[in-house]
Image: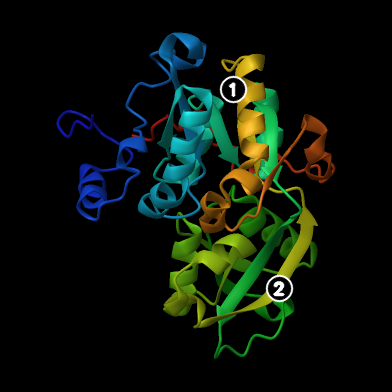
């Protein structure tokens, strides 16, 4: 049940109403990150007592788009586990990071660097990642731009989703700084916002990843071209908090790893063909980068609450 009074929901009541009006069958799967979540001690509450699993999705795109593509998967997992799996997201990536810090999500889809940090800080345990795919960041410009390569962006204004977006921000910025380039970053909250900003001429270029670039609005995508791709890394992690039992992890792992055969239609909107079982050392390539928290925008994480107020 969604309450609109005396609450500060991450997904607004207007959004929920719009979902109901357009008939999305996933509306009941949309959860709220409510004020005081960490203070209420949800991270210490046994999943078996709540009979609910909170599925937190990194906000690379708008909440409405994430609900539309992840909501049906949450419903599928509910059927497979006999436990209600509730879709949740936050208004921006820094808030999502604060919720990972607090262990607010039982299951979380997080970027590779987030997993490296929060597996150690909050005890998240790897469960799966996208199958047969590596994560590559990319840089886009308008089709009519004179920019031919990343080197031409020295001194430019560049849009990024957030300081901590691994493929879309952390790696491209690191590679430009290694080249001795200067640039003015503009953080715009989501990947889709990056693409729209570049298409509108509000930034000279923008960082993204292949999956979100391919799934952004065709009208926007047709105005852009890719001028740079980063090296490839282990993709986003699906991980569970310490509150999730080994028995539940086994059930979830099987449900996720068989999605490609059992329900490929749920993966297609995510830009995936399958998920495969993963272990903690799957992200050793990211650890080998030796990134510092401040390089990924995590130096202020202690000052942000879940949800951001």
Residue 46 visible somewhere in the drawing: no
Q: Quadrant of the C terminus?
A: top left
Q: Which residue is mark 2?
A: 228
Q: Residues within 10 Å of mark 2 (few under 14, many from 20)?
A: some
Pick the residue in front: 87 or 220.
87
The local secondary structure at tag 1 comes to loop
Residue positioned 64% across, 47% down in the render:
261
Residue 181 visible somewhere in the drawing: yes
Q: Residue lying at the far front in this picture: please name it.
A: 262
Residue positioned 50% across, 45% down in the render:
93
Q: Which residue is mark 1?
A: 241
As displayed, is residue 103 above or below residue 93?
A: above
Q: Residues within 10 Å of mark 1 (few under 14, many from 20)?
A: many
> What is the quadrant of residue 138 in the picture?
bottom right
Pick the residue in front: 169 or 130.
130
Judged left or right of residue 101, residue 16 is: left
* Residue 172 position in % (x across, y down): 69, 61
> What is the quadrant of residue 232 in the picture?
bottom right
Q: How many marks?
A: 2
Give the label, 2 or 1, closer to the camera. Answer: 1
* Residue 121 position in % (x across, y down): 65, 24
As displayed, is residue 202 above or below residue 81?
A: below
* Residue 171 position in % (x across, y down): 71, 56
Judged left or right of residue 285, residue 102 is: left
Q: Quadrant of the N terminus?
A: top left
Residue positioned 56% across, 15% down in the render:
243
Q: Earlier in the sequence, mark 2 or mark 1?
A: 2
């Amino acid at each position: 049940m969604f309450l609109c009074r005396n609450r500060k929901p991450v997904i607004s009541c207007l959004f929920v109403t719009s979902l109901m009006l357009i008939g999305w069958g996933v509306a009941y799967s949309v959860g709220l990150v409510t004020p005081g979540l960490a203070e209420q001690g949800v991270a210490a509450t046994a999943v078996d007592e709540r009979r609910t699993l909170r599925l937190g999705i990194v906000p690379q795109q708008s909440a409405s788009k994430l609900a539309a593509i992840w909501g049906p998967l949450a419903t599928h997992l509910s059927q497979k586990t006999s436990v209600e799996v509730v879709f949740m997201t936050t208004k921006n990536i820094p808030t999502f990071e604060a919720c990972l810090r607090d262990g607010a999500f039982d299951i979380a889809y997080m970027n590779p660097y987030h997993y490296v940090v929060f597996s150690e800080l909050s005890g998240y345990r790897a469960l799966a990642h996208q199958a047969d795919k590596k994560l590559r960041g990319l840089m886009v410009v308008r089709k009519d731009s004179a920019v031919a390569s990343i080197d031409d962006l020295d001194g430019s204004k560049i849009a990024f989703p957030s300081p901590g977006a691994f493929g879309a921000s952390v790696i491209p910025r690191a590679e430009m700084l290694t080249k001795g380039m200067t640039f003015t970053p503009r953080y715009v909250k989501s990947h889709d916002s990056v693409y729209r900003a570049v298409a509108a001429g509000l930034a000279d270029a923008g960082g993204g990843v292949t999956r979100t670039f391919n799934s952004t609005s065709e009208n926007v995508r047709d105005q852009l071209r890719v001028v740079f791709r980063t090296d490839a890394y282990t993709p986003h992690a699906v991980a569970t908090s310490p509150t999730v039992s080994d028995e539940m992890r086994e059930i979830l792992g099987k449900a996720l790893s068989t999605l490609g055969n059992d329900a490929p239609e749920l993966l297609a909107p995510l830009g995936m063909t399958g998920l495969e079982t993963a272990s903690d050392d799957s992200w050793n390539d990211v650890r080998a980068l030796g990134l510092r928290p401040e390089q990924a925008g995590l130096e202020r994480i202690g000052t942000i609450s879940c949800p951001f107020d």
